[in-house]
Amino acid sequence: MTDRALAVVRAGALTTVQDLGRPGHAHLGVPRSGALDGPAADLVNRLVGNPPGAAVLETTVNGCAVRPRSTVTIAVAGAHCRVTVDGRPVPWGAPVSVPAGALLDVGPAVSGVRAYVGLSGGIAVEPVLGSRSTDLLSGLGPAPLTDGTVLPLGRPAGVHARVDVAPQPAPPAELVLRVTLGPRDDWFTPEAVRAFVSRAYRVSAAGNRIGLRTEGPALERARHGELPSEGMVLGSVQVPPDGRPVVFLADHPTTGGYPVIAVVRAADLPAAAQAVPGTPVRFVAVRRR
């Protein structure tokens, strides 16, 4: 077996392989998938000298621990956390050399939700439909990591960055999501639409890679009955029967039968990946283009 591999010692709550995802396959019922915090995934790849889109590890809440079989350069970004190599602290947000056989431990998130681990050469699992991403909804790509999983690594393609610590945005104290109303805002009362863009919501602990669920005022419908299933895009804000908006993220379904009151601008979605439960959420209406 090649020495360009790493063994998972502690998989954590949810650690998956992610890259840029599978855009362009919605007509086949395949979501985009990919890293929820794209800028953080891009950053760790740049720090270790990988090309854009190399596959990284995405951890959730409590990190993970892995043991490479050969010396690798790693970088951790996204959620702030303690990073150690064989128990010794190493910098977060900077490239670090990890010797063969050493234990790299990415600790629980101190702030934020998801940490990203880039490794020189990238995770080299077999791509599916052009991507190595784990898709929780469709089941495409590698399964979420479990203790004992062994992942192949590619060959390093470049030289790692020369930085002490790379600047990164902090997790949001308030998650502000700019939305374009529609296409089904007319399914809600005028009062409900006003409440949606003026009242405060909170991030629910029930969210996942499929969608960010919110807690707050229930939105009352003006029209009742069932809506025929229709196409859904990244950032769609769907309102299920309980009236609380759900923001669809990377592993969202490609069709759905609940009305979509608005769509979040893609540039605002990476912050949603790092918003901890209880974070205030504000939907801000912008003009239709």
Image: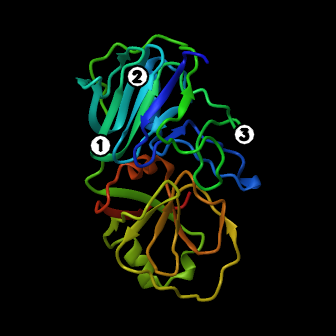
Task: Please state, as top left, top right, bottom left or bottom right, where the C terminus lies in the image.
Answer: bottom right
> What's under tag 2, amino acid-wise?
Ile
Q: What secondary structure is found at the residue carrying circle 3?
A: loop
User: Which quadrant: the N terminus?
Assistant: top right
- Local crowd at mark 3 within 10 Å, few (<14), some, or many (≥20)? some
Q: Secondary structure at mark 1?
A: strand
Q: Please tell me how crowded label 2 is: few (under 14), some (14-19), or many (20+) other residues with Cα within 10 Å.
A: many
Q: Nearer the viewer, residue 279 or 58?
A: 58
Give percent across and percent down for residue 210. 53, 57
Considering the numbered disc 2 on the image, is that residue within a helix, a strand or a loop?
A: strand
Q: Gap between marks 3 and 2, in whole Å?
A: 27 Å
Q: In this view of the protein, which residue sits in the foreground, 3 or 139?
A: 3
The residue lying at 34 percent from left, 72 percent from top is 198
Indicate the amino acid at tag 3. Answer: Leu
Q: Are marks 3 and 2 in contact (CB under 8 Å)?
A: no
The residue at 58%/20% (across/down) is 154
Which badge, 3 or 2, is on the more N-terminal residue?
2
- The structure residue drawn at horizontal position 38% and vertical position 25%, both measured from the top left corner, is 75
Front one among 229 and 283: 229
- Residue 169 appears in the rendering: no
Q: What residue is pinned by disc 3? A: 129
Numbered circle sitting on residue 74? 2
Q: From the image, tell me which residue sits under label 1.
A: 108
- The numbered mark, 3 or 1, whose residue comes first in the sequence reads 1
Q: Is residue 177 above or below residue 48?
A: below
Name the colour scheme: rainbow
